[in-house]
């Protein structure tokens, strides 16, 4: 694969990587093993604060949760950048999105599209990935979404 400059691509899109979000418990933001980086689940923090809280399909709309998934994916990219440098990413392999879901809410795939579409904007074909979109009863700090990534790196 050819070497890419993903940080330049972010700049073209007018997107700045945030600082790596501080862990809220006993873990690290990302771990490398071999040619892969696994991120811990990332919440939609902006400047150290959750942008919204609550369950999707109740206090949080699916559209707002989709935007939050995009932010969480950006935070996951920051974790990768902090560990190995974003320009060392070869491709995004997998996305796992957790959606705090109200009873009867079944739109988890649409919410997690916020992360998937964002990764496509940044990485193009190298952002096409396998994915899980999981509805859960609760997430840490009452966040509506949490996103984790697996990336292949050089």
Image: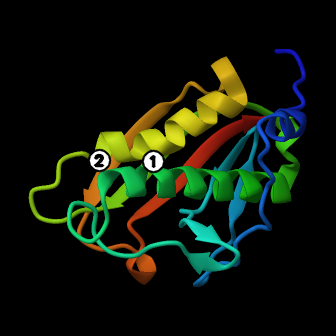
Residue furthest out toward the top:
1
Crowd class of label 1 (few under 14; some 14 to 19; many from 20; radius 10 Å): some
Element assignment for label 2? helix
90 vs 40: above or below: above
6 vs 75: above or below: above
Element assignment for label 1? strand
Say which residue appears at 42% left-offset and 73% top-offset: 143
Q: Which mark is residue 96?
A: 1
Front disc: 1 or 2: 2
**Which callout, 1 or 2, points at the residue further toward the start of the chain?**
1
Residue 152 horizontal/vertical position (percent): 71, 35
* Residue 56: quarter of image: bottom left
Residue where numbered disc 2 is placed? 108
Say which residue appears at 16% left-offset and 54% top-offset: 105
Residue 47 horizontal/vertical position (percent): 70, 75
Image position of 54 (left or right of 93) = left
Say which residue appears at 55% left-offset and 65% top-offset: 44
Say which residue appears at 82% left-offset and 52% top-offset: 81
Image position of 123 (left or right of 50) = right
> Can see residue 152?
yes
Tell which of 122 and 64 is nearer to you: 64
Report the number of discs.
Answer: 2
Distance in Å between CA atoms under marks 1 and 2: 11 Å
Q: Quadrant of the N terminus?
A: top right
Q: Which mark is residue 34?
A: none
Residue 45 horizontal/vertical position (percent): 60, 70
* Residue 18: quarter of image: bottom right
């Amino acid at each position: 694969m050819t070497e890419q400059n993903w940080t330049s691509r972010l700049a073209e899109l007018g997107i700045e990587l945030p600082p790596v979000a501080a862990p809220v418990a006993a873990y690290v933001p990302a771990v490398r093993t071999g040619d892969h980086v696994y991120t811990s689940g990332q919440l939609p923090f902006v400047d150290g604060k959750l942008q919204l809280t609550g369950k999707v399909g109740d206090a949080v709309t699916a559209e707002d949760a989709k935007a939050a998934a995009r932010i969480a994916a950006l935070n996951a990219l920051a974790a990768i950048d902090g560990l190995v440098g974003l320009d060392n990413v070869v491709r995004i392999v997998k996305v796992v999105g957790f959606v705090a879901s109200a009873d009867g809410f079944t739109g988890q795939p649409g919410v997690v599209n916020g992360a998937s579409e964002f990764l496509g904007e940044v990485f193009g074909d190298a952002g096409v990935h396998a994915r899980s979109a999981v509805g859960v009863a609760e997430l840490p700090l009452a966040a509506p979404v949490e996103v984790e990534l697996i990336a292949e790196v050089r």
